Image: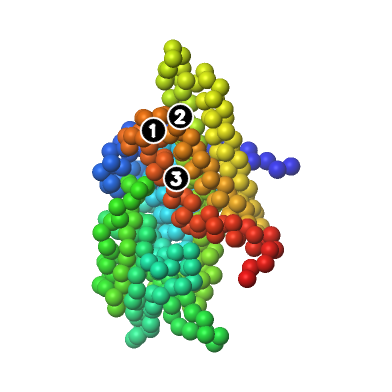
Amino acid sequence: MVDYQLSEEHEQLRESVRSFALNEVAPVIGDYYQREEFPYGIVSGMGEMGLFGLPVPEEHGGMGGDYLALCLAIEELARVDSSVAVTLEAGVSLGVMPILRFGTEQQRTTWLPRLASGEILGAFGLTEPDGGSDAGACRTTAELDGGQWVLNGSKAFITNSGTEITGFVTVTAVTGTREDGSKEISTIIVPAGTPGFTVAPKYSKVGWNASDTHELAFADCRVPEQNLLGQRGRGYAQFLSTLTEGRVAIAALGVGLAQGCVDECLRYAEQRRAFGRSIGSNQAIQFKIADMELRAHTARLAYYDAASRMLRGQPYRKQAAVAKLASSNAAMDNARDATQIFGGYGFMNETPVGRFYRDAKILEIGEGTSEVQRMLIARELGMPTD
């Protein structure tokens, strides 16, 4: 029988992160969000809890847990705030996991203990200003010269790339041409502060205002040849694998936001009175909240399914795409309905619902648009792919 009952360890973790989110994040994150300021104190607390090292083996300084544990932590954080949740999601799925999956023993020894403790953050430089969903249209180049990679190009919308604790960015770059004329794409680790590596000022964003996002530029940026991550020419396959795995984590974030909308609406519907009674006594409000719970619950089952298949070593590309699509839909729909329930208060930035509404849209875009997820699902179903 299929059983999505959490283990005792997973449940304890979920409760611990829930307590941290309610007691440490919720009281202060609104101010960070309004100031568009990265919450270093909160991130430090997450590091002390071991959240950045949840799926990292103990021999590399991690907690020795699994990817589901990471997803549960992300979901609980996102129930309160998505900026904090995406800092953890990107820090692990895009920062830690490529090193863990594809790095040499020396690279793992160098980077993983510091990443797992939250001392530093890693970023993943894939998207380019003219790339977007066509990730294979990479224009950034890396040429070998005297035992060094020389990088030239730019990346856009890169999370965790310009903080004071950013340790490196893993960059996809064209390193040659294959016999069939196609691009040879590889991934290269570029430490923060490397000459020729420039971080542009932070973006002014619609949402995720307390997370860190920048455009990056590389101008004759030199790093040692040993900074190649994985096999030369396998960069495209590596980032596809990284994105598939990351979609399960971003799905957990979407579920958290969707559930957070339910949490806030339940509280508000009981407190808010109109026409002499609580608005929660109106069936129109009850049905709207019931639909919100339905979406969150269904999307959660979708990411549980994808995560369980991943942990069993089974194919899960379709399930990851389904989870990502279902959760982003749930987040958007729930944020819209929650704003409607809150009325004018839902349009105010200082309310959690106001933040949820602004944060939800990017979930239909980042780490694969909704259109890309539908394309992947159709492809996995065996439909033609001209």
Disc 1/disc 2 C-alpha distance (Å)? 8 Å
Image quarter of the N terminus: top right
- Kind of residue sitting beneath label 2: Ile
Q: Nearer the viewer, residue 58 or 118?
A: 118
Q: Is residue 350 above or below residue 161?
A: above
Q: Nearer the viewer, mark 1 or mark 3?
A: 1
Precedes in sequence: disc 1 or disc 3: 1
Circle number at residue 360: 3
Residue receiving disc 2:
341
User: Disc 1 vs disc 2: Cβ atoms closer than 8 Å?
Assistant: yes
Residue receiving disc 1:
346
* Relative image position of residue 28 (x, y in whole percent): 31, 36
Helix, strand or loop at disc 1? Answer: helix
Image quarter of the C terminus: bottom right
Furthest-front residue in this view: 275
Q: Is residue 300 above or below residue 94?
A: above
- Kind of residue sitting beneath label 3: Ala
